[in-house]
Amino acid sequence: MNAIITCKTVMRFLRVIGIIAALGFCAQAYAAKPLIIKVATVTPKGSIYHRVLQDIGEKWRKAQGDNARFIIYTDGSQGTESETVRRLRIGQLQASLLTVSGLMEIVPSVTALQFMPSTFRNWREVDYVLENIRGDMEKEFEDRGYKVLLWGMGGWVQFFSTKPRMLPEDYKDAKIFAWAGTKDQQAMMISLGFNPVVLDLPDLLPALQTGMVDVVPVAPMWALTGQFYRYAPHMLKMNWVPIVGATVLSMKTWNAMRPEARAAMTEAAAEAEEELRSYREELDGNAIRAMEERGLTVYEATADAEKTWTDLVESVWPMIRGTMVPRDTFDRVHQLLAQYRATQQ
């Protein structure tokens, strides 16, 4: 009897050992599976934004090892920014360099950096505000499952048009491009008597070519790379809003990295942010000069014209505050700007 019990016990013990060994083998196989990060962006292939992503990816890949891969999809090949965010949520993508139009679908308060026209006067003001609110915003992103790797700026939005236009009244008969997914902005434009034409970025050039659109508010780099200036060769220069973006990574992927890989990515992202910051001043200038050589005519907004635009914007602040931009963030931005400007006097 004891011998039988002993044999049964041994057999059970061996089965348990077999199960443990099998689980261990599976765990090892899973651990050895290479970590793949798929990154999407609407920015052009070969642009400075693409290059800094490549640099981040290469430094991370070396630190992560185990055949890790960092795959970048440029030129909006993964769809619109709304589609990109959807792909992030379901795990088809692990990271993306997004403008505010995409970022706001994750954290609405980020609209304060781009949806407040004629609010920021220069990059120094943008920097001051961002440095004071980025901690809170990045915590919001983390709470929603995303790590902000870096912030970047893509120039100032200028107005490209099929004919010279200087004042708000000159745009009342225009068909103005508006980003898909910005319903509150479109409603505000309509209330002011403007005519927004809602499109995704890939559809903009054909719309210009066919006359469906005749005004494009866009940063010079986009006008150059997208060839929009060829059909809208008149630019009103007045720094309407800054284009602000950020590269976000899923926290699931971040947590799956080796500690040394996270450190390498953090360091590379900080270097990339500084490179983008130092390049942004010449970004607009280089693009505008290149387009002028190809026929673009630039009109500098006069002081009177700028005041007319500013007065228009201030008249719709009640529509922006609490709809396009959360109330508390809207108020904080204005408080920070007042604080900064007081130190510059």
Image (cartoon, rainbow, N blue to C red):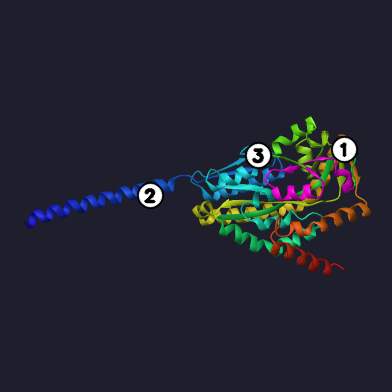
Residue marked by disc 1? 296
Task: Kindly indicate the quadrant of the structure image that contains residue 43.
Answer: top right
**Magenta region:** 167-195
45 part of magenta stretch: no
Residue at position x 49%, y 53% in the image? 256
Separation of marks 1 and 2 at Cα, in angstroms: 61 Å
Residue marked by disc 3? 76
State left or right for residue 158 relative to residue 31.
right
**Disc 2 residue crowd, few under 14, some 14–19, many 20+, Cα 10 Å:** few
Q: Is residue 116 visible?
A: yes
Q: Position of residue 210 (x, y in %)?
A: 78, 30
For badge 2, the amino acid type reads Ala
For badge 1, the amino acid type reads Leu
For badge 3, the amino acid type reads Gly
Number of residue marks: 3
194 part of magenta stretch: yes
Seen in the picture, residue 137 relative to 241 is either above or below; the reply is below
Q: Are marks 2 and 3 in contact (CB under 8 Å)?
A: no
Residue at position x 65%, y 39% in the image? 76
Separation of marks 2 and 3 at Cα, in angstroms: 37 Å
Q: Find numbered disc 1 in the image and state the secondary structure of the residue it sits on.
A: loop
Residue at position x 57%, y 45% in the image? 86
Separation of marks 1 and 3 at Cα, in angstroms: 26 Å
State left or right for residue 275 relative to residue 34.
right
Which quarter of the image is occupied by the N terminus? bottom left
Q: Position of residue 202 (x, y in %)?
A: 70, 36
Residue marked by disc 2? 27
